[in-house]
Amino acid sequence: MGYTKCSDIHSYGLEYGAGVRDVSHMTSISYGDAVTDALDHLDDLGYERAGQADLASHGPMGAETLAVLGHGDAIPAWVDAYRAAMANHDRPSRRFDLDPADKSAWRPALGAIDRVGDWEYLFHRELAQAPWREVLVRWWPRLLPGLMSRLTHGAIRTAHAVRSVAAAGDAPSPQQLTELARGLAYWAARFTPLPGAPRFEGRHDVAVAALPRTPFAPTSAPVGLMHDRLSRLDEQPGYHDALAALRADQAQSLLSDMTAEFAGICLVHTDYSPIPLVHAVTAPAAIRLVMPYLPAELHAPSVVAMWQVHAAMLLIFTGTDHGEQTTRTAAADTDVRSVDELISRAVEHGDEHVLKFTEACLREHALRPDPRYLAAAEAIPGRIPALSPRPAP
């Protein structure tokens, strides 16, 4: 295995940045077949994993990422390991129908996880009656104010599903359309609005330095810390000022600013669980996947909504800004594996966050090279336990 400096690695090919790579030479199964087969084997799982925190289920997202990375052959074994690692809640049942044409019917159900089965049925009906892109464009602005949903997992799951159905052209499989319905349903059922109104009024690309941090004990439990600080976000110094600090710019350029900046933030904040901040990279990278299928007037609102979530994540999950200003320079001097080795390492590691983070970093690096992406893809797998199934009882 040969390491090289981050500053010596440039682009991974624009075909990678476009969404789904041409990996026919790497695997014996096509991307679409691999995804559809995985969704079949994950169909019975609920939206969240059983346990104290009710963490979002990552099965469909992890399998789709493996297919994108050219390792469709590894998906069956990965799905088995994922299912065995932790129990999932049962698939929710439908209770009361929601009328998509009646705001007074569906708005009260936003953020109601006990209505997720109703939301899924609503989106099944929507996708059966209209093209998937039309449904996406109709619901994206309705759901965008709740982007924080379960650390942005609603939007991320939706984006993986969009990449899947878009790659299928005019013939997405029923499983792929069902997964899009479930991504949107989870976003709606975990809809989480944040206080304040983000807007373009400032002079910053990504105004990380404008946010004063509050130290926290390294032993703080992630879920408890999140709920505590989220409930007090409106009172955090600098929060409302930061929401107006972003300058108006091209949406694609701002997304690159965001993913690069937060890849660096993932590098320097090592005194706490890395998983929450991983989503500060995978979420804007996910929004980029969806943007080609949205009208231009939804691009800027998507970026400012993401910045509001970023501001919240910084205040919740970082207790200091130490080291953030020099991450790009430090990353450029970091020894990293080759791109193919980074992919192989992520696949062997198996954790769903490592897979998604590695893929997002490499895709973002292909679009606008920055050493922070590769350095973060090198570092994060060493901070997250590898996928390991539970021992048999």
Image: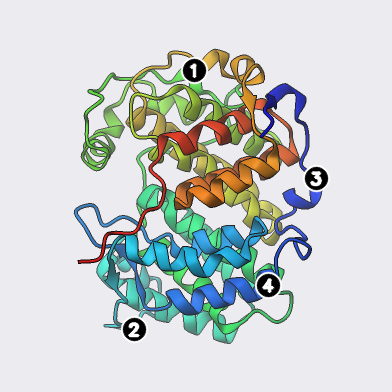
Relative depth, front residue between 170 and 51: 51
Quadrant housing residue 69: bottom right
Q: Which mark is residue 97?
A: 2
Q: CA distance from mark 3 to mark 4?
A: 22 Å
Please name the residue that numbered disc 3 is placed on. 13
Question: Could you give the CA–CA distance between mark 1 and mark 4, rounded to whole angstroms?
Answer: 46 Å
**Residue mark closest to the camera, 2 vs 1:** 1
For disc 4, the neighbor class at 10 Å (few under 14, some 14 to 19, many from 20) is: some
Q: How is the image coloured?
A: rainbow
Residue 359 seen from this side: no
Distance of label 3 from label 2 (alpha carbons): 46 Å
Q: Give the numbered dot on residue 293.
A: none
Q: Is residue 213 left or right of residue 174?
A: left
Mark 4 vs mark 2: in front = 4
Q: Check if mark 2's residue and mark 1's residue have beta carbons within 8 Å.
A: no
**Of pointers 3 and 4, the one earlier in the residue sequence:** 3
46 above or below 209?
Answer: below
Q: Specify the label residue 29 is tagged with.
A: 4
How many angstroms separate mark 4 from mark 2 (CA)? Answer: 38 Å
Which quadrant would residue 333 be assigned to in this image? top right
**Mark 4, secondary structure of its residue:** loop
Q: Is residue 295 above or below residue 117?
A: above
For mark 1, give the secondary structure: helix
Task: Name the N-terminal-most of marks 3 and 2.
Answer: 3
- Residue 113 sits in quarter: bottom left
Specify which label sits upstream in the sequence, 1 or 3.
3
The amino acid sitting under disc 2 is Asp
Q: CA distance from mark 1 to mark 3?
A: 32 Å
Which of the numbered marks, if any, corresponds to residue 209?
1
